[in-house]
Amino acid sequence: MSGDVAVLGVGMHPWGKWGRPFVSYGVAAARAALADAGVDWKDVDFIVGGETVRNGYGGYVAGSTMARALGWNGARVATCYAACASGSAAIEAARTRILAGLCDLALVVGADTTPKGFLAPNAGERWDDPDWLRFRLIGATNPAFFGLYARRRMDLYGAGPADFAAVKVKNSRHGVHNPNARYRKEVSAEDVMASPVVSDPLRLLDICATSDGAAAVVLGSAAAVRKLGSAARVRIRSVSTVTPRFPNTAVDLPDIATDSAATVTAPAIGFRESIAAAAYEEAGLGPQDLSLAEVYDLSTALELDWYEDIGLCARGEAEKLLHEGATTIGGRVPVNTSGGLACFGEAVPAQAISQVCEVTWQLRGQAGARQVDGARVGLTINQGLFGHGSCVILST
Amino acid sequence: MTTAVPVIDGWFTIDEPPTLLGRRCTECGTYQFPPTGSWCPNPGCISEDMETVPLSATGTVWSYTDAQYQPPPPYVSRNDPYQPFAIAAVELEREQIIILGQVADGFGVGDLRVGSTVELVVEPLETDGETVKLVWRWRPVVSGEAGDAR
């Protein structure tokens, strides 16, 4: 591809349960990213926001909400919603606009203020909304789906609660060193296994919380990089926002049923695996090239699924990879050096952007005590409900 | 006097033996559940002729879990205090489809294994005044008591 898009600046507002308007976190993250890039807001010609559905109309039009909060500057605007994948959809909107030659400096912002407890569907009687129906008819919360995936690892591969707990232990040790993380305390396997069961076999400390937080990136064209006169830049090598292929035989949030594979053979690889495959193909890179990865650990067990989906190991071997220390900082391919969702909790529209922030800091050698030595290539991956792939590959 | 009705119309029957109702494309044979689409979900087929068909009443457990905490609204708990329940994702062989459902009253995760057999039942989800609202559930088949094998 001619002309990679550069990550010029990154910034975050620390994750927590701060209880303030999401706009305030977004402005803080945006200003941090602009300062990091050395870019003046008035020179930004495209702003895109990750939508939040829990913060009223201002959240539905997050792009313009942020533009107004920063002070109207006449930039083109867009807002993206793709559930947990909203951040990467927003990044992709900015990247493609830059690649099309339609803009030089883009600001991408995601911010959220979340309620306490389970994420729940929007209110009202919504008999045609699959997300509402799964609560109404089955009581299938998000952790219930995570429980289904976790149990499958146990019955198919012999995984156990101690394996899942070890993921949390690892991520908590990473997150201790991250000033933007909400939980900065080492957690022991005993702590995890003593926490109450939420959705069997997963316990409270296996499952990520919901948080307030914000992340932002400033992306630039080759011309913008030249103008800023900076040398070493982090580049976006690919973005994968793929949908599933029919028949999608994976049990996926929020659906009550999968597609039927009775007449059309299911694809050779499942949806999650196809998200990474498309990103690798576009980047011309493979799992062997990765220095690190940020994966969406909505649950501890799900992090293990991702190891296999992004090709770090064969099916059923994720527990072995984990226990070998390969995915710990200092190992062959550290995963969730930021501490992951285990230490952040989920701030939906900000999360995929925050993954890109972490990889950028790593590739610049600015990750402090959680730095991966010689990091050259990093991958971020997640999945938004209703069939949204989300994967970004970055390199020095 | 109480009356029993499905909590949602058109997704399952409640007379014995109950069945889930799916749709099946008359052109290519693709199945669909829930039965909400009026066109074929197969991207290689443009048919808009979907017939309503009963789905297999037994299936194989793809995975299972439970809800130890009360789900938020719009879930309505039948019990106060709240009683946990199990959930199973069940693969139907003929239809090659996985359908979620609660697990029948009296059964929990200890009664299930990936690959074990379950059968469809209809049980009360909630009581709303004089009306009992029914929902489909998956009940483990105890060996020797095979369900309605096809």
Image (cartoon, rainbow, N blue to C red):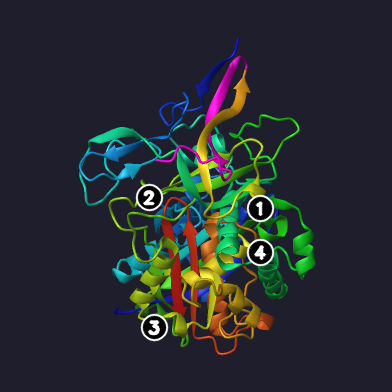
Residue B137 lies within the magenta run:
yes
Q: Is residue A86 left or right of residue A163?
A: left
Q: Residue furthest bottom?
A: A374
Q: What is the CA distance from the residue labelled 4 to the residue labelled 2? A: 35 Å
Q: What is the CA distance from the residue labelled 2 to the residue labelled 3? A: 55 Å
Q: Residue furthest front?
A: B144
Nearer the observer, disc 1 or disc 3?
1
Q: Are marks 3 and 4 on the same chain?
A: yes
Q: Please name whichever residue, B72 or A152, is drawn nearer the observer in this view of the structure.
A: A152
Rendering coords of residue A285 (x, y %): 39, 81
Q: Is residue A322 left or right of residue B115?
A: right
Q: What amino acid does circle 2 point to?
A: Gln
To which residue does mark 3 refer?
A226
Tag 2, which secondary structure?
Answer: loop
Tell me if residue A234 can be seen.
no
**Up-down relation of residue A232 to residue A19 (above or below):** below
Residue drawn at the location 43% of the way across and 40% of the way down: B149
**Up-down relation of residue B2 to residue A195 (above or below):** above
Q: Are marks 1 and 3 on the same chain?
A: yes
Q: What amino acid does circle 1 point to?
A: Asp
To which residue does mark 1 refer?
A200
